[in-house]
Image: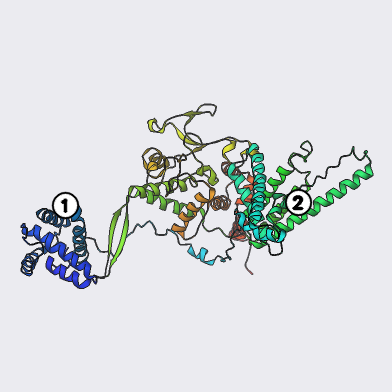
Amino acid sequence: MIANPTNFLQAFNEFSDVEKNANLVANVKSALFRHYGTGVRKTKTKQARLSDRMIKTISNILAKVTIDSDFDREQHLQIFEQGCDLLNLSPEKRKSPRSYFNRLLTFIENTYIDKKPSLPEKTDLYRIKDKVIDKSYIEDNRKIREYKRKITLESDPEFYTDRLAKKYPDLSKEDLRNIAEIALKKLDAEFNEYKVFWQEQKLRDESIKTNMDRFKRILGWLYREDDTTLTVEDLSIRLLVPVINNKVDRKKLNYNQDAIYIAEGRLKDEAREHSRELIRLIDRFFRKYDIRNKENANKYIDALVSYGKYLYQDITEIEEADNYEDIILIRYLRAKKRKIREMFEDSQTKPLPLTWDEVLEVFYAYKKDADLDTYDVIEFDKRRNKTYLYKKEKRNRSKAQHLEKFLILACFAIIPPDRQRTFRELTYGDTLKYGKLDNVGNLIPLEPTLDSNKEGEYFLDLPPSKHKMGNKTKKHYLQPIPNRKFDDGTHFYDYLDKWLFGGYRKILASPEATKVFVQTQKGGDYKSSAELCNLIKSMFKRKTGVAVNPHKLRNIFATHLANLGVDDAIRRSAAYSMRHSFEVAEKVYCNQNDQEKVKPINDFMDQIWSNKNNKGKIHKQ
């Protein structure tokens, strides 16, 4: 459709009136009259510059080149190239005038040619950024907490020289720096010894690093406390977790019961006092950083317990206490953890941001993102005061990103949501396998692309080293991933096979990536829990206005089962699938509020009273 029929000369004159850049107008005029005009005339001018008479001649020709509904940009570009051929211009010398001529063609298309359909009054738009549920009011109502930067130990020796100068006023700055370097190396050696100990205990490197980061955070805060006189030489993890051996050498005391009793009492009193001092320090640290989250607080306690176990490994009596129950400091830390748990359990349960049905709405929204190869674009043309709607083709990279996001969310929805680590570390052929079970439950491997009879299933294969509770439970999980059928008749395996074997993972994955899911932008493996958690939070934020992390998905699912009133057998099975006990599911993951907890008995009472009213045994007064 043509908005206002015109010709090339009128179009250029209007472009000259609208465009304020005189140099741009001059360059566009040169490209139009000299290069395009030569192509239209099919004759090369003798002069290097156009004379006034020649400009007038070409103007008359351009006035006859009409712009109508059959306007073809490529045809006019061909004429432009023919003019350049006649002018014997090299490819390099054509670039600049071609770009200016394209500016005019774009102006003509935007001003005169309606290539896009106008927006209908009623239309079902599909735009990736649109919300399916608007829960943004939840984010808006959350109390905005003052941001407190997590201070950590500085690695630059220069940072510590000022305080050392007060301790050693006669030393040079270079000497002070050397002292700081030696102290930091000593501290690094402490961390390394701790690391080696827990590596031997088969603790994951990521967990060890996280614990060390927390030690550094506490020490960094302690060094910066206003009333402290600590220097870098004083910094040690033993400053937080002192070693006090309350075991008395009875032989040295000649087995004198009174002497043994007094010596043990003194050591125990000293251990209790240091333990109380550590608890007070933890409380100050929590207040400083306004730590209100139970999980976050417990992780700091767990880190200190882990260091206590390292320090007391040769003191604890394994035969009498297999988990350091005989170490007073560790008992105090565990008691502190119980108090933290009780404190948060006594507080009012916060409402969950979404229901499980709403989670599934988000799931199907991302399925739609993965299904469609185009999306709707709405543009407003100020010149015509009209809004246009058109389809835009997705790039292959976008298709791959949408497919991966859908699959990641599907992993938390088609089976009871596992911890994010399971899917962050998911590796085909290792923790993700395809095959069928024999009569006694052993997995017979099959190749998905060759399984024409669809005999096989995908399985999560999680030995103890591959899941969080493995060191405690020693359980090996072999869990089938059902090939769920969706509303449109497609199946989960269709998407998973497309990602793994259809070339889509290769679009995003870098050469060094080994996991099933890769970072959507960089293409590498997800290195930390925060990276995958942030992706999932952003996915929910886009579709609902509120961020939901994988742990919260577990809360929502456990609460959903409780609200449905399913029997304990189902809830125990769900807890097993989610890799925790039934008791943990009830205490940690089920977030029923008061109304939800009393709803079953209220409904039951309604039935009782309804039945009695129907029998006429209760009369209104």
Residue 332's label in the rendered image is 2
State whether residue 614 appears in this view: yes
Residue drawn at (56%, 38%), measured in percent from left and top? 466
Residue 480 placement (x, y as % from top left): 50, 37
Q: Nearer the viewer, residue 430 or 183?
A: 183
Whole-percent x and y of residue 392?
29, 55
How many neighbours does mark 1 have within 10 angstroms: few (below 14), some (14-19), or many (20 or more)? few
Which class describes the residues within 10 Å of circle 2: few (<14), some (14-19), or many (20+)?
some
The image shows residue 501 at horizontal and vertical percentages of 38, 37
Q: Which amino acid lies under the numbered mark 1 shown in the image of this protein?
A: Ser
Drawn side of residue 508 relative to residue 312, left or right = left
Q: Quadrant of the image for the N terminus?
A: bottom left
Instruction: Determine whether the residue tagged by mark 1 lies in a helix, strand or loop.
Output: loop
Quadrant of image for the C terminus: bottom right
In this rendering, position of residue 496 left or right of residue 54: right
> Height in image: 467 above or below 216?
above
Provide the residue designation for mark 1. 90
